[in-house]
Image: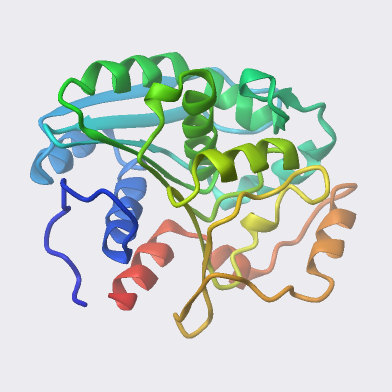
Amino acid sequence: MSVPSALDHQVTGYSLAHAYWMARAARLAYENPAEVERQARAWGFDRVRHHESLFEPPFALEDTQAYTMASDRMIVTAFRGTEPALIRDWLSDAATPPWPGPARTGYMHYGFAEALDSVYPGVRETVAGFRDGGQTVWFTGHSLGGALAMLAGCRMYLEEPRLRADGVYTYGQPRACDRVLAAAVNKGFKGRLFRFVNNDDVVPLLPPEPAYAHTDALRWFDAKGTLHTSMPRIAGAADRLRGAVAGPVVLPSDGVRDHFIDAYVAVLERSL
């Protein structure tokens, strides 16, 4: 397989090629609005709407930003991530009371849920409005943006099943909900949600278990760039991270290096 030269607007299921393009869409969320619109047009999307809130949760997450682009065949909503320097804030926030899940299903991480809540009404309205020709709908995001993409897709599905996304692709996503909500996501998005982890990326280990859980459908790239559907447990890593919630954390440089969105785009490109 070679790197596809264009995003396929007619795709309906999982493929590495589509994962590559969703990673590029997630990377685009870090750009300014003018660049988002320029690139979206180059990819064949004629409608773009930006979602932004300067509302700040009670810990150091930046403002929430996302964009939605639409063509006559496909709609993509991509959420922007945050900087690795803020990983320690996610750790220290682990003790914050959780936020009730959508449709009274389980619980969500408070900070992630509040960040999503600040832009969700606009995202929902845009997706519903743009879906005027039976387009497929996709959510994507990197880092914090991955958590928001998963939670947005879950919220739409549980609150309005007709708006269920055709797929959710996340990259370097932290844990965002409890086991009850994760189980509901696994059921509702079976074969539709794919969570990519690059080698030693430390962010998917945060916030720590057992309060928070991941959804299924893992896609893990090892140090050689080989793709697996499971990840070997790194002895003691989870315990070290649990112990870190009480104080400052010095994150391993390779864990941060593997977290950058450019690293995900690169490993997916090599896999093709």
Residue drawn at x 36%, y 47% is 26
**In front of the other: 36 or 210:** 210
The image position of residue 218, as x and y in percent, is 55, 61
Residue drawn at x 82%, y 42% is 211
Q: Specify whether residue 41 is in view.
A: yes
Residue drawn at x 68%, y 26% is 105
Residue drawn at x 50%, y 44% is 146
* Corner quadrant of residue 126: top left
User: On the rendered image, what quadrant is the N terminus found in?
Assistant: bottom left
Q: Is residue 177 left or right of residue 189?
A: right
The image position of residue 88, as x and y in percent, is 72, 48
Q: Is residue 241 left or right of residue 227?
A: right
- Is 54 rendered above or below residue 89? above
Q: How many marks?
A: 0
User: On the rendered image, what quadrant is the C terminus found in?
Assistant: bottom left
The image position of residue 169, as x and y in percent, is 42, 49
In this picture the colour scheme is rainbow
Q: Is residue 237 left or right of residue 3?
A: right
Q: Is residue 158 left or right of residue 246?
A: left
The image position of residue 137, as x and y in percent, is 30, 35
* Corner quadrant of residue 49: top left
Q: Specify whether residue 176 is in view.
A: no
- Is 248 rendered above or below residue 93? below
**In front of the other: 110 or 127:** 127
